[in-house]
Image: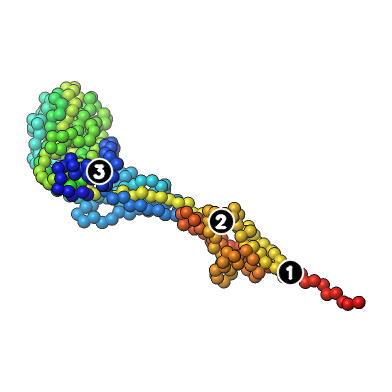
Amino acid sequence: MCALMLPRKLTFLFCFILVGIIGFSFTEIKGAYTSILAVITDNVTVCGTSTTLTTSTIPGYSNPIWNDGTTGTSLTVNASGDYWWQVTGANVVTNGDFTSGNTGFTSSYTYKAKNGNQSALFLEATYGVYTDPNALHSGFSSYSDHTGNSPANQRNMLIVNGAQTANTIVWTQNITVSANTDYVFSVWVSSANAQNPAQLQFSINGSPLGTIITPPTTTGVWQYFTTTWTSGAAGTFPIALVNQNTAASGNDFAVDDIVFAPVYRRNVHVVLNPIPVLTLTGPHTACGSYNLTQTIVGYDTNTYDYFFKDSNGNTITTANATAISLSGTYTITEQNKTTGCTSQPVQTTVTINPNPQKPGISPL
């Protein structure tokens, strides 16, 4: 990443020119990071219809994920194109899974503890931290946190009755960031009520980040949302989730497993070149000598180089291959001049018969 002692906007502009950032495109989809980071691109060119890409070890980073949302250190691809893998560092959010209850964060909403008649969150702009939304509001659906733990081992989630004021902070925490570092900001969100789903948005230092986060209308279905952010100077900033929905009816949701962590992405540009398929005719019989190039179907010296070997594995020059004089099994391969991809070796058998001799003529 760029590390220049310039004002943040100038640093970003310089990095844009130097590295060639394509841009930012935030599309929240389950299981995949979708913003484009300014990182190095590896170029992979192979002969064949597929290749396996692998991640590198980045000290302090783990949990590799690929552009298609799959995890692990390798990915087999079957088409030319652009791919990426990403690893994350340690999550700097305190109590992001709410296991420790109502601690480690603040909110512009009013905290309400569980009561005995499922009415703790009857008022808008209130929240609670518990294992089941229905326990805090009789009109909310009953379900567990996003990891789906059994009742004997349930964990907490942040349960919210949305406010009628836009841009109200649902959750915020001050975090310390390193200079010129990419961070991933992610959260799991579900609807506790099917009406008017929440319209959440990430925020850093008071500025909105990414697009609106809208969980599914089906209650209890956890959806993963993520975006990325690049720091300028090191410092401590408030990161937040704000709600842009102002509906009084519905606008009820739950939040779980908030992550803010340094992220490293590596782009990979893959080119898969086809392997030539060589076809030979044969066997052949000739008198005196034979031109091996005549066995090649679609002989094309503009596109391919050809290589010849005799029965003993000895290399034959192209010039000699046009007039072989010994019987045997010959091996031919072709190589694409542009891609360097080589066909499988193919054999053909040639039988060379001696030329007939002129009959003797006796003198009179």
Looking at the image, is 144 positioned above or below residue 74?
A: above
Q: Depth check: give the residue in front, 267 or 262.
A: 267
Which image quadrant: the C terminus?
bottom right
In the image, taking residue 18 as reference, residue 279 lies left or right, namely: right
Q: Position of residue 88 (x, y in %)?
A: 22, 49
Read off the residue under disc 1. Answer: 355
Residue 330 picture quarter: bottom right
Using the image, tell me which numbered label, if any, was put on residue 229.
Answer: none
In the image, taking residue 119 as reference, residue 288 lies left or right, namely: right
Read off the residue under disc 2. Answer: 301
Label 3: state its secondary structure.
helix
Q: Residues within 10 Å of mark 3 (few under 14, many from 20)?
A: some
Q: Residue at x 28, y 37 (%)?
A: 25
Q: Depth check: give the residue in front, 246 or 83.
A: 83
Residue 12 picture quarter: top left
Q: Amino acid at mark 1?
A: Asn
Q: Amino acid at mark 2?
A: Thr
Q: Residue at x 38, y 50 (%)?
A: 270
Q: Amino acid at mark 3?
A: Phe
Read off the residue under disc 3. Answer: 16
Earlier residue among tags 1 and 3: 3
Calculate the distance from the C-alpha at mark 2 to the C-alpha at mark 1.
30 Å
Q: Position of residue 154 (x, y in %)?
A: 17, 41
Q: Depth check: give the residue in front, 270 or 17.
A: 17
Label 2: state its secondary structure.
loop
Q: Residues within 10 Å of mark 1 (few under 14, many from 20)?
A: few
